[in-house]
Every structure is written in C-alpha cells, then in structure tokens.
Image (cartoon, helix red, strand yellow):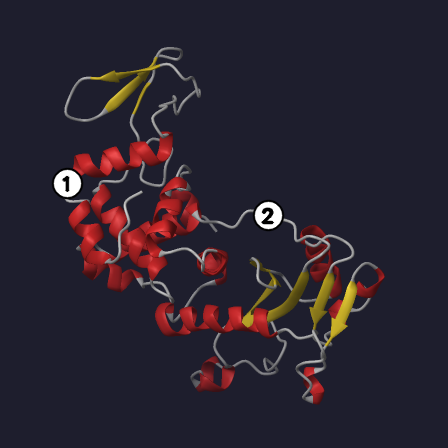
Amino acid sequence: MTQFKNLIEITQYFSDRQICIDYLTQIRWKGNVTCTHCGHGKVYELKGENKRYKCAACRKQFSVIKGTIFENSPIPLQKWFIATYLLLSHKKGISSCQLAKDISVSQKTAWFMLHRIRFAVQTQSFEMPATAIVECDETYVGGKSKNKHRNKRVEGSQGRSGKDKTPVFGLVERNGRVVAMKVPNTQKDTIQPIIDKHVNEGAKIMTDEWQAYKGLDNRFKHGIVKHGEGIYVVGEAHTNTVEGFWSQFKRSIFGCYHSVTPTHLDAYIDESEYRYNTKDLLDYERFENVITLSGKRLTYANLTTK
C-alpha cells in the first residue's frame, strides 16, 4: 500500500499512464486477472502499448478499466485519481467548478466524474445489531423561503414542510456507521419500515418527539427527548450524533455545492455517508478503498435520466 500523505505526493506518484494502469490492476485483481465479461480465470495478456487481455473462454478482449467507473472515459487515470482524492479528503467535498479548474477539464466533465465517484461509494444496506444504540432523525434540504426572492417564496413552508424542501431520513449507530436516504415524507408509514429494515429488534432507539416514532417501544427500547420543550439530553437519550451528521452534510450542500436538485440528492448523501463511515481511515486508506469499489459503471444517460 502506497501511503500518500498529501496531494503533492499522489500527483508525483501517478506521474504517467502506465503507473496508473499497474496500480489499478493490482488493486482490482490483486495478481489474479479475471475476465470482466464472463468471470473466467484464464486470460492471456496481449502484446502492445495498451495493456489488454483476452479471455480463454469467451474469447473477448478487455482492459483493466472495463466495467469500472473509468470505462469509456477519455480522461487520463491520473486525473481520475486526483479527483477521487480531492473529493474524499476534503471535509465538505469539492464542487465541479473547482475540480474543473484543478485538473483542467470542463465543468460538465468534472460534474460527471464526481457523480461516478459518488456512485462507486454508494452505501450498501447493513443491519445495526440488537446491542446497538441507534439515533434516528429527519431533516429537510432546501433553502429557507424567507431568504428567497419574493416571487419565489412559498407560503406555509416553514418547519416540517416538503412544499419547497426535500425530506431526508437518517440512522446513526453510536460509535458506528450512518445510513441516510431521501424519503417522500417523514410520516410513520415511511419512517418505521426503514428503521425495521436496518435495526434489529431489541436495540435502543433514540429519537425526538416527532409523531412518526410512536409505537417503536413495541419492538425497541425507545428513548425520547422533547426538543419542543428545550430538553435535549435525558440520560443516554439524545440525538446529538445524528444531528452532527446533518450539520456536516448541510455544510457540504450550502457551503460547497450551494444547490442540489432532488433528482441527485441521494448521490450527495452517499458521498457524506462514505466520509462519515470511513472517518477513522487515513486519506490514503480511503483513497485505496474507493479504487477497490470502482468496479461498477454509471453512464451519462443513466445519470441524467429523471
């Protein structure tokens, strides 16, 4: 494992195309190249400047970027690796405008690259054990109506309103992982099935007094803090951890990306989730893990299809 301490070192190490290809080959296959078409383990390395392989079973040719987020991209791997490092080492991410300047590509190209990286780090479904203490909370993403131009303000959009904001729900295991997602609303019929999916019965659930959490004490040990009465901690019952995640997530949106459409909101949530869930990793460890996860493909057509 190459321990990159900063951007200068990662730029110097990936100084040419062959080094990038060799690094990706080692990370992806760890010395055992398999066919990206059929998964067969017997392949032949073809001669030539462009490192390619041919499968002994299906007879198809492929390269190390086949079936990855880098496939069919004219952007050099060096720029891809720098973009990956920048996105995941910066606490609030990096905007496509800034990345475009940093690696000399168009803003549209930078935007597509960042979404491919976010696609690679999508949080997989996981269960929180019955011994866990899990905090649940919902939030809304979107600017305050009072800060908008007068002709764009929406009446009755204060508080828990989805008229001009998008609801998001999240669960955080204390000293553990977070899982969050865009939801159609924050009602009981929407929220509680998500909790049941991710949290094993018997776990301790900590929430505020929102009515969507009523009835959780039938399946979990349910602690409640009444924020409306100015009560934020009752023994071990509080939602400070998940609110800390929301705080960091919203700083990313408001301070870096400024405006995120509901269509792509889940991708930005995935990005923040990944940084939170890998907060104990060093930057070079997080970078290598992302390269390991890059074996999936996102096309521009799929990204822009509503």
Q: Residue at x 32, y 36 (%)?
A: 71
Q: Residue at x 44, y 21 (%)?
A: 39
User: Which is nearer the eye, 119 or 43?
Assistant: 43
- Checking the image for residue 16, the label placed there is 1
Dot 2 crowding, Cα within 10 Å, few <14, some 14–19, many 20+ = few
Dot 1 crowding, Cα within 10 Å, few <14, some 14–19, many 20+ = few
Answer with left or right where residue 197 lies relative to residue 76: right
Q: Is residue 197 above or below residue 166?
A: above
Cα gap from disc 1 to disc 2, whole angstroms: 37 Å
- At which x and y percent is residue 148? 44, 82
Q: Is residue 228 above or below residue 27?
A: below
Element on which disc 2 rests: loop
Residue that badge 2 annotates? 125
Note whether residue 221 is visible.
yes
- At which x and y percent is residue 80? 27, 47
Residue sitting at the far right: 218
Residue sitting at the far bottom: 230
The amino acid type of the residue labelled 2 equals Ser
Q: Residue at x 25, y 59 (%)?
A: 99
Quarter of the rendering containing residue 191: bottom right
Q: Is residue 146 above or below residue 264?
A: below
Which comes sooner in the sequence, label 1 or label 2? 1
Note whether residue 164 is visible.
no
Answer with left or right where residue 133 lies relative to residue 27: right
